[in-house]
Amino acid sequence: MKAILLVGGMGTRLRPLTLKTPKPVVPIFDRPFLAYQLEALAQISEIDEVILSLNYQPDRIEDSLKADGSFPFKIRYVVEPAPLGTAGAVRYAKQYIDDSILVFNGDVLAELDLADVLDRHRQHNARATIVLTEVDDPAAYGLVETDLDGNVKCFLEKPEPDHIASNTINAGIYVLESDTLDRIPENTNWSLERSFFPSLIENKEKFQAYISHGYWIDIGTPEKYRQIHWDIMDRQFNVQPFRSSRADQVVLSPSANISETAQFIGPCFIGENVTVESGAKIGPYAVINRNCKIHEGAVLEHSIIWPHTTIGSRTVLRHLIIGHACKIGNDIEPIKGTIIEDESRIGGPAITF
């Protein structure tokens, strides 16, 4: 069986973080986001190949996955000639699909029994199955209404508030039969949500819903990108590196160089080859990725620091996301909520390792 991950988007809502790093490989702790999706697919022993549908910075995505490690299936990279939309991307890869296909949007993670999703799809002889999740405010998502038998009867992509009659939304995970893809025009920008799914309903084809009650997130905005880190730290989403962390929830890489007088307040994460100097205070809710250097007396709280970044002495960072290879000088306190893009230089003399 094949799976396809739709990872060709430009991640515009996450800019400036995605100007140089494609959204599918933004770091979640010390791993690219896409690796967590691939681990979820590894639950399904019958999946022997995962197709990555690429468009934006495809080489960066491929390089990141090769560096992350191996998975128990073949990974095929398919680069769209132009953005083709969610349906167009699946259609473009159809030559590699000969059976049911499991489809993931490239920005969602879910705590979900995928084998159970496939079983439901097959038991109902469905032409398509969509995973739904319940949210408090469905207005920003694709709204899905079902009948008592779980058949999808209405699909509204980001409806107006007065059209909302349900709180079950599209979770961005689907099972499709390969021959349903023939209706999608070739080399055309086409949407699963706005065109493909409505065609199933219009033709009265068997279109099933699977409602998941587990954890779900779409990391498409900076707020959600922060949230997935805090949720993993709080074990709301039970994955490494906090699945088996110590009681104080301070995760330190064995290769980190830590001063005896540095302070850590969990939850916090310190990656490979990080240096934390004397008197620095890290946490709570601090993520410092590999090859960063935190100088003496610096304070980091509720912040995420990408690799190869240097933080100056006595600098205070609260509620920030700082990109790759930044240099933040001494005695700086950026505005809370700021996103600092890759290779930025802020204040003070140049800092080197």
Image (cartoon, helix red, strand yellow):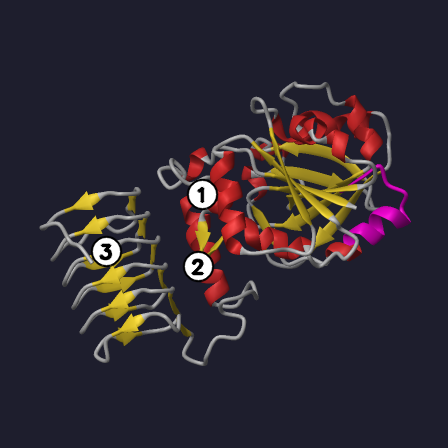
Secondary structure beneath dot 2 equals loop
Q: Position of residue 172 (x, y in %)?
A: 64, 42
Q: Is residue 309 left or right of residue 144?
A: left
Identify which amino acid the numbered label 1 is placed on.
Thr
Q: Residue at x 38, y 35 (%)?
A: 19
Camera-nearest residue between 247 and 150: 247
Earlier sequence position, callout 3 versus callout 2: 2
Q: Quadrant of the C terminus?
A: bottom left
Camera-nearest residue between 91 and 217: 91
Earlier sequence position, callout 1 versus callout 3: 1
Residue 127 falls within the magenta-colored stretch: yes
The residue at which mark 3 appears reads as 310
**Magenta highlight range:** 117-129
Camera-nearest residue between 26 and 162: 26
- Find the distance from the CA under tag 1 to the CA under tag 3: 25 Å
The residue at which mark 1 appears reads as 221
Specify whether residue 197 is in view: no
The residue at which mark 2 appears reads as 29
Identify which amino acid the numbered label 3 is placed on.
Thr
- Crowding at label 1, few (<14), some or many (≥20) Cα neighbours within 10 Å? some
Earlier sequence position, callout 1 versus callout 2: 2
Secondary structure beneath dot 1 equals loop
- Crowding at label 2, few (<14), some or many (≥20) Cα neighbours within 10 Å? many
Q: Residue at x 37, y 41 (%)?
A: 17
- Find the distance from the CA under tag 3 to the CA under tag 2: 17 Å
Figure check: 226 above or below 12: below
Q: Position of residue 152 (x, y in %)?
A: 78, 38
Residue 146 falls within the magenta-colored stretch: no
Instruction: Name the mark nearer the viewer: 1 or 3.
Output: 3
Identify which amino acid the numbered label 2 is placed on.
Phe
